[in-house]
Amino acid sequence: MKITVAGTGYVGLITGVGLASQGHDVTCVDIIKEKVDKINSGITPIHEKDLPELLKKVLERGNFRATLNLKSAVKDSDITFICVGTPSREDGSINLQYVEDVSKGIGEAIKENGKYHIVVVKSTVIPGTTESVVTPILEKYSGKRAGVDFGIAMSPEFLREGKALEDFMHPDRVVIGTSDQKTFETLKDVLAFEQTHVIKTSLKSAEMIKYASNAFLATKISFINEIGNICKKLGIDSYEVAKAVGMDHRISPHFLRSGLGFGGSCLPKDVKALREKAKSIGYEPKLLDSVLEVNQFQREQMVKIAEEKLSNLNGKKIAVLGVAFKAYTDDIREAPAIDIIKMLLEKGANVFAYDSEALENARKIFGDKINYADSPGEALESADICLIVTEWPEFKNLDFSKMKNKIVIDGRNILENRNGIDYVGLCW
Ligand code: UGA
């Protein structure tokens, strides 16, 4: 199949390279020239395991390339995936500007495409968007009718950063929202590479499945954080509790790690967008509100414990270990570390941050307001307190001997040797 992928963020680039590795002829499109050039020269703009090797392979094979020219790519292909970003507005609601812009361009191109072209929305969009925003734009600019002259579908992506290719290649399920059987059959062949559950739904259900999945994962984390906070007050080890609770197959052991909660480009944004959509249609989403509240509380709690330990943070040297929102990524979007560092700075602390991958991104936000250490040891030297914020394996065993006060607040329950220090767990 000849495939166009619009947008080269996480979902777009993984989809493009992943489909090319399956033998399809793929053209990825972006509006940023620097990104397109990088991709064409084999450099991945995102940090993802195994992606550089696979990108090089498909570039060499000649069935993958990136371009700025959406129109020529779509005109010449069978399927176009919309994988552009859907950022949050100030109030948390979804901003569809990129989806609208790209839909217009695709519409103009399929006007000149003689084949039955299929457009698939992969971007995370609020239920109703494919039907009431994307389809009308495509129809307007192509002069063609959806389901008659071209196919339309919504197929959400469930990949995790750090394990993106693995998740793309071996999905738990493939959801294809469409009312058009021809489109469904084609996409089933393209997206389900191996034996997996393939679910055909309406466009709206496919969109909602994505939000419900992420909202549930976020809820699970806030739930275990709330249990963890109660456990801590009762002197109970919340990890012991979570282990046994997770053995119930109805619950599962995943997403039961209590601590600093969720960050990243998806969980916080999607829960907020769903909450705002619910409010806009007259439903008060009490649970979603609480999920976000508990998540914020965890971040504040870490700073509160630090303040209680040192009585005053003004002028104190604080080692912040980990800035990325989780291990194995350089992504700091909505990372707990950002809020924590901001709170520490407000209290006059002298922050020394260390992260093996994410400091460059941290510098874009904090500039010279904080110090950037080259190693955990440099951050810890003469520090008054150490905050472990990201679960990087290198933080499992640290040398705290050069700290001024050997106080360590572990936000991820990762530290293995807790002897000889004043160890404080967040919810344990
Ligand atoms: C998440 C979902 O897991 C993916 O299925 C989804 O496709 C993706 O969002 C998306 O919508 O694109 P991701 O943002 O990569 O993936 O991150 P997760 O691995 O889900 O972790 C999210 C956050 O939750 C991290 O900050 C992590 O530290 C935290 N977390 C996770 C916990 O605090 N406790 C846990 O038990 C698990």
Image (spheres, rainbow, N blue to C red):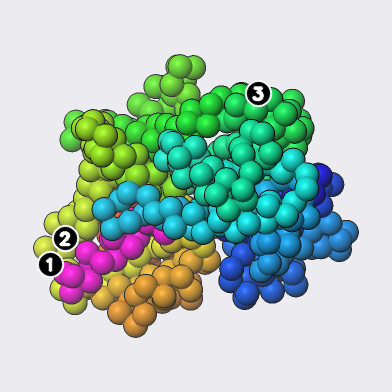
Judged from this view, the residue extending furthest toward the right is 61
Mark closest to the chain's N terminus, 1 or 2: 2
Could you tell me which residue is drawn at 54 percent across and 42 percent down?
135
Amino acid bearing label 1: Asn
The x, y position of residue 377, in whole percent, is 44, 71
Q: CA distance from mark 3 to mark 1?
A: 55 Å
Q: Which residues are magenta?
A: 333-348
Counting from the top left corner in percent of width and height, residue 189 is at: 77, 32
Dot 1 lies on which element? Answer: loop
Furthest residue toward left: 311
- In the rendered image, which residue does mark 1 sit on? 312
Kindly indicate whether the residue at mark 2 contacts the one at mark 1 (C-beta within 8 angstroms): yes
Q: Is 207 left or right of 59, judged from the image as shown? A: left
Dot 3: within a 10 Å radius of its alpha carbon, few (fewer than 14), some, or many (20 or more) residues?
few
Locate the N terminus and report the quarter of the image it occupies. top right
Main SS, magenta region, reads helix
Q: CA distance from mark 1 to mark 2?
A: 6 Å
| Residue at 30%, 51% in the rendered image | 92
Q: Which residue is mark 3?
A: 197
Quadrant location, the C terminus:
top left
